[in-house]
Image: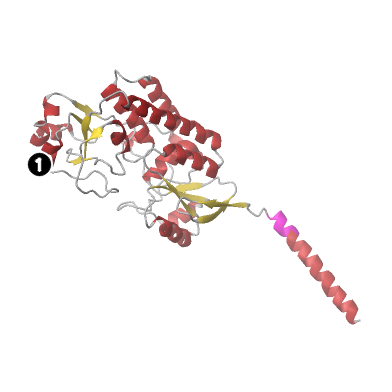
Amino acid sequence: MRILVISTIILSCLILFSCTKKQTEGSGKTETRIWVDDTGRVVELKANITRIAVSGRIAQSIVYPIAKDMLTGIAEPWSEFEKSVIPSEYLSLPVHGRIYGIKGKVNPETLIALSPDVVIDIGANMAESRSDMDAFTEKTGIPFIHITLDKTNLDEVFIKLGALLNRSERAKQLADFTKKVYSFAENTMKTVTPKRVIYLTGSRGERVIAHNSYFSSALDLCTDNVAKFSHIERMSYAPFYTNEQLMLFNPEIVLISSICDKDEIKNNVAIQSLDAVQNSKVYFFPHIPYENMGFPPGPCEIFGILWLLNTLYGEKITFDYQAETALFYQLFF
């Protein structure tokens, strides 16, 4: 009898185990994979990612051209200029806020409700990036990953995104174009003397894109960016300058952001006294779709390189500026 009871219990357990296993197998359990992000964190992600969110403006501008159909929301509202080139179906995406910066901080409840498979952070790899990604993951229950964007490595960022999102073919298109533009700059700058420039921004032209900052890649690659300070916060965008500093910069050419008010520029005695302005060596950067070539870093810097090379060294370039600009918009927007 005891043997019969034990046998019955064992048989019952085997039947229960078999049913549980079948239920698990038949329940559509999500397949996962391991991803090591650029902070060195080991993150478990869905094998097939279809829903994504972004950490801020930089990630938004870079993820959009490779996987706009996967976006569950955006970190910042589209600007009026972006709306002119972005298809209407993406203009109504909900805004969940960004994880860094003073305004528009991320709303965890909104982010959770959007149910993305992953939140992608792209930008500088800062000392706190690793702990921040861990903290946001713990707070929301959504995996956060970081991809490092530094000077002239945008092509590598696209390749990583392609592997992450199973969009390798699309990623290669974007990476190849990006590398081609970098090569345009490298080849052109071998044949010219870099122009001494400053890039004014702010509504009154009261700020400059500083040399060797996180936002000056295009300028530093294609010019002698004379806005050199004894000390700058590398991640601080466009520091203010004094009139004395402006005189010392003494640029050969003045580049001006399209967000600057032209009347303010005309009424600024310090700017108007520059030799470059007196000699009509002034160019306004086109606001299509971003107002500055370095803000945010990413696709707008690629356009910025094309524009700088054509504007400053037009007689030396070996590429068709109109054709490459058209291809840029086709690929990125």
In the image, residue 246 lies at what x, y percent? 13, 38
The magenta stretch spans which residues?
22-27
Find the residue positioned furthest to the front: 190
Find the residue positioned furthest to the right: 1
Q: In which quarter of the image is residue 310?
A: top left
Q: Which residue is drawn at 31% across and 40% down?
A: 295
Task: Say which of 137 and 180 sits in front.
Answer: 180
Q: Residue at x 35, y 53 (%)?
A: 100
- Going by the image, does 93 lie left or right of 216? right
Residue 173 shown in magenta: no
In the image, residue 29 lies at what x, y percent? 65, 55
Q: For the residue labelled by badge 1, is the local secondary structure a helix, a strand or a loop?
A: helix
Task: Say which of 105 and 166 sits in front.
Answer: 166
Q: Residue at x 28, y 22 (%)?
A: 313
In the image, residue 118 lies at what x, y percent? 50, 51
Q: What residue type is labelled 1?
A: Glu
Question: Which color scheme does this rendered protein use?
Answer: secondary structure
Main secondary structure of the magenta stretch: helix
Q: Residue at x 18, y 34 (%)?
A: 261
Q: Quadrant of residue 219?
A: top left
In the picture of the structure, the residue carrying the numbered disc 1 is 244
User: Is residue 250 in sight in this rendering?
Assistant: yes
Q: Quadrant of residue 288?
A: top left
Q: How crowded is mark 1: few (under 14 residues within 10 Å), some or many (20 or more)?
A: few
